[in-house]
């Protein structure tokens, strides 16, 4: 289980870093699309780290609080990233249709 979580965390953090670098070099709506993808990657990474913290065998209060906070922040990042990605993809299609 820990190996799967580690792979998910590493891959999603890699995608988040890639999109964080890429969105700064793109103009307009494409930058927002890459930023939304970065938020999705960061959300998945934070969810993985939070889930990893919550599932440790020797649980203490600090670890539980940190895990819950990471789960919350990761969930918010994931949901808002998906919402923004859908919005900007629709906006991009509308702009391409007008051309």
Image (cartoon, grey):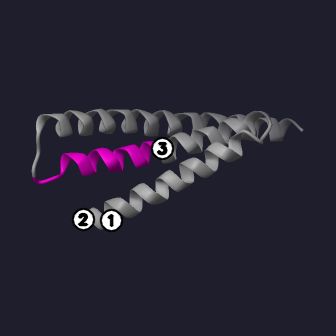
CA–CA distance between discs 2 and 1?
Answer: 5 Å
SS under mark 3 = helix
Is residue 21 within the magenta segment? Answer: no
Magenta stretch: helix, strand or loop mostly: helix
Q: Residues within 10 Å of mark 1 (few under 14, many from 20)?
A: few
CA–CA distance between discs 2 and 3?
Answer: 20 Å
Of marks 3 and 1, which one's residue comes earlier in the chain?
1
Is residue 52 within the magenta segment? Answer: yes
For the residues bearing labels 2 and 1, Cβ distance under 8 angstroms:
yes
In this picture, residue 34 sits left or right of residue 10? right
Q: Which residue is mark 2?
A: 1
Q: Which mark is residue 42?
A: 3
Q: Residues within 10 Å of mark 2 (few under 14, many from 20)?
A: few
Q: Which residue is situated farthest in the right direction here?
A: 99
Q: Position of residue 17 (x, y in %)?
A: 58, 49
- Quarter of the rendering containing residue 75: top left
Of marks 2 and 3, which one's residue comes earlier in the chain?
2
Taking the spot 77% from the left edge, 41% from the top edge, the residue there is 26
Q: Residues within 10 Å of mark 3 (few under 14, many from 20)?
A: many
Taking the spot 31% from the left edge, 39% from the top edge, the residue there is 71
Q: Which residue is mark 1?
A: 4
Taking the spot 12% from the left edge, 35% from the top edge, the residue there is 61
The quarter of the rendered structure image containing the C terminus is top right
The quarter of the rendered structure image containing the N terminus is bottom left
Taking the spot 57% from the left edge, 34% from the top edge, the residue there is 84
CA–CA distance between discs 3 and 1?
Answer: 17 Å
- Quarter of the rendering containing residue 76: top left
Q: Position of residue 69 (x, y in %)?
A: 29, 32
């Amino acid at each position: 289980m820990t190996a799967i979580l580690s792979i998910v965390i590493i891959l999603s953090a890699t995608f988040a870093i890639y999109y964080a670098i890429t969105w700064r070099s793109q103009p307009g709506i494409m930058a927002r699309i890459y930023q939304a993808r970065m938020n999705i990657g960061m959300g998945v990474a934070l969810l993985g780290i939070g889930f990893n913290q919550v599932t440790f065998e020797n649980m203490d209060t600090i670890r539980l609080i940190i895990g819950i906070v990471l789960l919350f922040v990761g969930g918010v990042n994931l949901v808002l990233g998906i919402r923004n990605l859908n919005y900007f993809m629709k906006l991009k299609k509308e702009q391409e249709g007008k051309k």
